[in-house]
């Protein structure tokens, strides 16, 4: 069943857990995520990121109807989310296509411009009944991992509070030590920073770069208010590893089947950890 981000995060808050949010740049990954969520009877979020088009993976106009089709017929609540939309025209296209949630990412901009653009995104989304996630602070320079030494790009708690109040967003993505992609070093999470942010804002918090974080750290960040965990890299890696281990298979359907099963199993593991301490279902 298709729902908004705001709705699905209410479930997470009520249960004191996090919802897995997975990038799905093709139908195989969509099927892997939905089937895993249904097997566990857990809500889930499907995501398309603007960068997928730049990487040549898929165009939003092509993948959105597929994401929405599987979401609408799913047996569990599913949000279809536009991840890291970097310009307002792209956000508008996503809303026109039926995304029930959008993320405006102006984190690389001046805070005042980011705030102004995010406010516009919120006004647009309201007309569609959609939710908005936005980011203050940035993980942009840590695509390949970080030792946590670059203080300047971490989210400032007081700035985060003002940003939430001025924009009216439904969820806040904050930078506190995670990174996109494969971690070259064990991530060093600034949990005190996250705790302070959680004490100052009244919307659910989002962790980007969720792949590769330890089981124990997942538990800690969920206790400190993280309600949405973005996860893709290790799911995709699981699919690729399964394909690389095939022997004597020359047909694409064999490759796709192996990748689907491996991604499904990886998503099962991730969702199970995110919902582990759930108070109720």
Image (tube, rainbow, N blue to C red):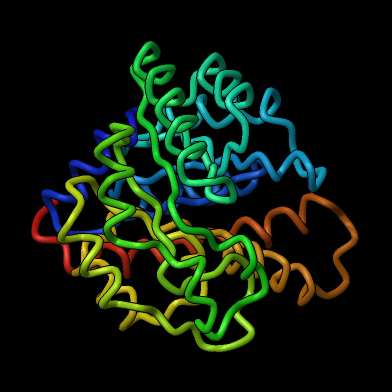
Does residue 229 lie above or below 53 as drawn? below
Relative depth, front residue between 59 and 177: 177
Relative depth, front residue between 39 and 106: 106
81 left or right of 29? left
55 left or right of 215? right
Q: Residue at x 29, y 50 (%)?
A: 42
When asked about the image quadrant of residue 7, the answer is top left
Q: Residue at x 79, y 43 (%)?
A: 54
Name the quadrant of the N terminus: top left
Relative depth, front residue between 238 and 17: 17
Residue 238 in view (yes/no): no
- x and y, in percent, of residue 200 in the image: 18, 56
Q: Residue at x 45, y 23 (%)?
A: 120
Q: Residue at x 49, y 30 (%)?
A: 117
When asked about the image quadrant of residue 188, the answer is bottom left
- x and y, in percent, of residue 92 in the image: 56, 19
Residue 217 in view (yes/no): yes
Relative depth, front residue between 11 and 106: 106
Does residue 84 lie above or below 274 as drawn? above
Does residue 276 lie above or below 108 as drawn? below
- x and y, in percent, of residue 277 in the image: 17, 68
């Amino acid at each position: 069943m298709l729902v908004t981000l705001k709705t699905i995060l209410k479930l997470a808050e009520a249960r004191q857990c996090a919802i897995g949010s997975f990038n799905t740049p093709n139908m195989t990954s969509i099927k892997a995520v939905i089937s895993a969520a249904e097997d566990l009877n857990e809500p889930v979020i499907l995501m398309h990121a603007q960068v997928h088009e730049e990487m040549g993976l898929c165009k939003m106009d092509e993948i959105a109807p597929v994401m929405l089709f599987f979401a609408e017929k799913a047996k569990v609540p599913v949000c279809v989310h536009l991840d890291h939309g970097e310009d307002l025209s792209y956000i508008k296209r996503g809303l026109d296509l039926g995304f029930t949630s959008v993320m405006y990412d102006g984190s690389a901009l001046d805070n005042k411009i980011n705030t102004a653009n995010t406010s516009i995104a919120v006004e647009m989304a309201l007309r569609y009944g959609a939710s908005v996630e936005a980011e203050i602070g940035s993980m942009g320079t840590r695509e390949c991992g970080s030792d946590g030494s670059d203080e300047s790009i971490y989210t400032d708690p007081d700035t985060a509070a003002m940003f939430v109040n001025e924009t009216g967003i439904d969820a806040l993505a904050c930078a506190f030590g995670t990174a996109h992609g494969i971690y070259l070093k064990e991530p060093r999470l600034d949990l005190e920073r996250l705790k302070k942010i959680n004490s100052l804002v009244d919307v659910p918090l989002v962790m980007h770069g969720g792949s590769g974080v330890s089981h124990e750290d997942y538990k800690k960040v969920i206790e400190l208010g993280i309600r949405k965990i973005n996860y893709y890299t290790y799911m995709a890696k699981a699919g690729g590893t399964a394909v690389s281990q095939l022997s004597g298979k020359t047909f694409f359907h064999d490759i796709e089947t192996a990748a689907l099963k491996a991604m499904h199993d990886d998503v099962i593991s991730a969702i199970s950890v995110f919902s582990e301490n759930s108070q109720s279902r």
